Structures are given as structure tokens and as C-alpha cells.
Amino acid sequence: MPTVVLMDVSLSMTRPVSVDGSEEFQRKNLAVHGLNMLFEHMASNYRLEFTSLMAFSSLWDLLVPFTRDYNTLQEALSNLEDYDKTCVESALQGVSNVVQQEWGSACPCQVVLVTDGSLGIGKGSLRHSLQTLKHRGDDKKFPLPFPFPTKMYIMCVANAEELQMTDAMDNLEELLRLSGGDGQIFSMEGPLCMKSVQAMFGRLIDYAYSPFHAVLHCGNLSSDVQVFPRPEPVVLDEEVEPMPRSVSTDLEIIGFIEIGDISSPPVISRHLVLPIAVNKEVDEVGTGATDELEEEPSASQMAGKSPNFCVLLHGSLKVEGMVALVQLGPEWYGMLYSQADSKKKSNLMLSVFDPGAEPLPWLGKISHLGPVSEAAENPYGEDDNKSPFPVQPQVKRSYAQNVTVWIKASGLQTDVQKILRNARKLPDKTQTFYKELNRLRKAALAFGFWELLKGVADLLERECTLLPDSAHPDAAFQLSHAAQQLKLASTATSELVKNGLIYNSLYLCGPRWRQHLFVLNIVRCL
């Protein structure tokens, strides 16, 4: 998840902060110190994270585009200049432009806004922007909420007492609410000093940038891994009292399945699984010569030579063309698989399914799956010419019935053409003609598509006039009868809808079966 750091460089950030027994610092210096701490943490724990640095006052400026080079970000922080008043709205508009240009509107993003809590003065201030929200046209909309999913963290280089003396905290909370509510406001505790700003950014790191370490188990084998990005808690809406469910730090592989059987399942998130080298032996460096120390292999080299179950699993899944089913928690599953970035590079990936005992309907309940060796006969056949999936449900699904659905115009066109083909072969195709016509009319009445009934009636009348002289006399009679009944149905149904009546079901047959001609049930809408 990319991160945008939005640094306030207005004049209010240059206010001095007196620290006992040392030189005076500006609030900007405290903010730079905290951001350096954040960048150092991300360089060692979030090296795959893309981060951008922007500065703002009355205007905004992109100092460093999205990068993984945290040295460049720290150099840009040391060269910040001071500008004029604070204008948060223009800065947020800049964030929206930069993120959409780089990632589009589907990629979630994190925004870290570093400021001193000053709202600005006059027009362009945050107070003025929030007061005029409801009096704007479409061409001057407030940039929040962003068109992409976002989490906003507001870092205030001020303590809570200072923010509550004015309406700064209320306006910042409203800003957080407009962004979607996913995020938090952090303020300094105690006096403004280096220790307090370190504690504030430490809370941000623990809340949003702490790496997710877990242990991957498979029988007697295990491996320490890092899951990146960190899996987010999931809240089930169908529960009576929704509670967030988090991925367990113990990932248990419960079995393996072929890629063709699991197909392309729906997932809620995808993550990289990276092995972690754990040195259980304490390195002891004596007072030997420098040449002897240089000959000693480094810790990373030693870790690369030591066996690791995660590497073994990745290679096995890649060669065998299988995926590993993983239990993430009680009745919560996912899958591990190898995904190739290029011809030479691939990664071990974790896809998280929706919580539940049956996340993939065609596999049935995950707890009911078992080893192939315990089956009475090979479910894949002797020559691997069949598959036990999809599992047939015990209860017949309602969508398995023959229901007419028109998703595209081509489907409707095909149904009309089928009716016309049968109409040209009357009276031999009378039964098929009325079957298709009733199916179309039933669907049109259910959808309220009265124009379709009139259009098909006009087509049948046109076919009646185009019949050759050698046509059977009953063909013209059937066509005119069907067209008349379609027009009557469309007119009568539209009138009934206006009067509060609807058709439950309607069947159209030839004149030989007039007893089934009209509506079976008419009910009054409540």
C-alpha cells in the first residue's frame, strides 16, 4: 500500500520550541526528526513500500515521487524551505492528483499529514473550507473523500491541550471523517521535545507500519515468515454483533490441491510471503585481526545457505502446479501459490478467502476435504481424466431453474429470432412457437418490458403479411392470434400496473387451448 507524506512548511511550523538545557528547535525540526525515524523504520521493515514526499503551504510541491529509496526521502527532508500560510485543501487536491496519476483510483493509499495543528487564515484555511462545503458547485468540490481507498494519519506537532484551546481538534476530526474515517489523529504527549515526537511517531509505527510476522506450519516443518502487506482485520456484516477478525500468527497448511481444481477463486486480499532468517546462535566476535574478520561470512550469507521450509514449499508448488490450503483462523482459510513476475522470477503469494467454512462453493466445506489415498477409488481416475469438483450441492439451487435472463442485447435478439424462425414453420412448429413465445412474454411481464410485447406483436403481424400463397391457412390464423394477445397483454398489464395490480403468471396458447389463455392469478399490491 503506497504512502504519501504531506509535510506542512508554512510559517507556523517555524515557531520556536524551547528545550531545557539545549538549543532552541523549530516545530519543523521536530517534524523532520519524527519523519526520519519513520523512514528508517520503513527502510528496514517495509522495503517494498512505495513512498512519496510532498510539501505544502498555500501551494503544494512534489519533492520526491513514489520511490523505495529512503535515502532520497531523508535528503529531501533536510533541504526543506519555509513558505507562507497553511492551505490544507490545495494540498489534499495535490495528493489526489499525484496518486491517481501514478496508481489510478483502485489502489488503496495511506496519507500521513504532518502539521502543527494551525488551520490557516482567511480564505483557503481549513476552517473556511469546511464551512463552505455545502455551498460549492461541481467544479469546486472539496477533494475529500478521495476517489481511491485511503487511510489518513494526522501527525500534530502540538499537544492535546494546545489543540483544544481552539477549534483545531474539531476541524481535524471533521477532516478525518470526510476522508472515510479510516485513520487516526496523533498528538504529542507532554512538552514539545525530541522524546515526545519520537513517542508520537512510534505510536504511528505500531498502529500502521508494524510488520506482520507469522510462523508457517506444515506437519513437523515450520518457517518464520513475514506477510506483506499486513493483513487487515475483516468484519462480517451478516453477524448479529460484528467483530473484526484478524489473521492468526500461526498459519497451518492443511492440504494441497491442484490449481485446476481451485481455479481462480474470489479473494479479499493478496500478500507476499517472505522467509525470515532467524539466527539462533549468538555471534561472538573476538579480538582477532581485521583480515580474519573480513573472511568471516556475513549473517545474510549464512542465512542464504541455511535450509528454509518456505523456500522448499515455494519450489514444490511451482514445479508440481499445486496450491496449499492454509488455515488463517477458526473457519477462515486462504491459499499459498507461486506467482511468476517474469520468466526468471516468481514469488510465494498468500490469497485470503472470505471467512467461513465454505468460501469456495465448488469445493464444498473445507473441513470435509481429505487425502486422496483414503478414498475408496481414485477420484481423479486412473489416467487423471476426471475431477471430483465441483461438488454437487444436496439442495437444488434456485438459479438452476430455467429462468430467462437478458444481460446483453444479443441474448434478447436471439430469443426474438428463435420465435420468428418457428413462426415461419407454422403449423408444424406450433408447440415450439408457443413455448418460446410464452417464455419471452413471461419474462417481459416480470421485467415490466411492455415495449417488447408490442414490438414482437408488430413483428408477428409483419410475418403474417409476408406469408407466401402456398402457406397453410392455419399459419396466418396462429400469427394474428398471437399478435393480438401480445398487444392485449401489454395494454392490459400497463393499465393494471397504473391501478395497483400486477400479474403473477400469464400463459399464452393457441385457440385450441383457450381455457389457459389468460391470467392465473391477479393480486393487489399492498
Image (spheres, helix red, strand yellow):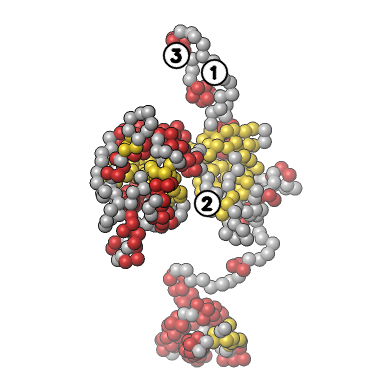
CA separation in Å, label 2 and label 3: 48 Å
Q: Tell me which label, 1 or 2, sits earlier in the chain.
A: 2
State whether residue 260 appears in this view.
Answer: no
Farthest-out residue, top: 289
Q: Which residue is mark 2?
A: 268
**Mark 2 neighbour density, 10 Å: few (under 14) some (14–19) many (20 or more):** few
Type of amino acid at the residue the image marks with label 1: Asp
Q: At x 37% / y 28%, what residue is drawn?
A: 21
The quadrant in which the N terminus is found is: top left
- Looking at the rendered structure, the kind of residue marked 3 is Glu
Residue at the spot 65% in from the left edge and 50% down from the top edge: 331
Amino acid type at image mark 2: Ile
Which residue position is annotated with label 1? 283
Q: Position of residue 263 (x, y in %)?
A: 55, 51
Element at badge 3?
helix
Mark 3 and mark 1 lie on one chain; the one further toward the N terminus is: 1
Q: Residue furthest left?
A: 84
Q: Earlier in the sequence, mark 2 or mark 3?
A: 2
Residue 294 got which mark?
3
Find residue 335 and report its image quarter.
top right
The C terminus, quarter of image: bottom right
Q: Nearer the viewer, residue 225 or 57?
A: 57
How far across and how far down the image is residue 488, in percent?
A: 49, 90
**Disc 3 to disc 1, C-alpha distance:** 15 Å
* SS label for mark 2: loop
Tell me the SS state at disc 1.
loop
Q: Can you tell which of label 3 and label 1 is closer to the viewer?
A: 1
Residue found 56% across the figure and 27% down from its top = 278
Disc 3 residue crowd, few under 14, some 14–19, many 20+, Cα 10 Å: few
Residue 30 seen in the current view = yes
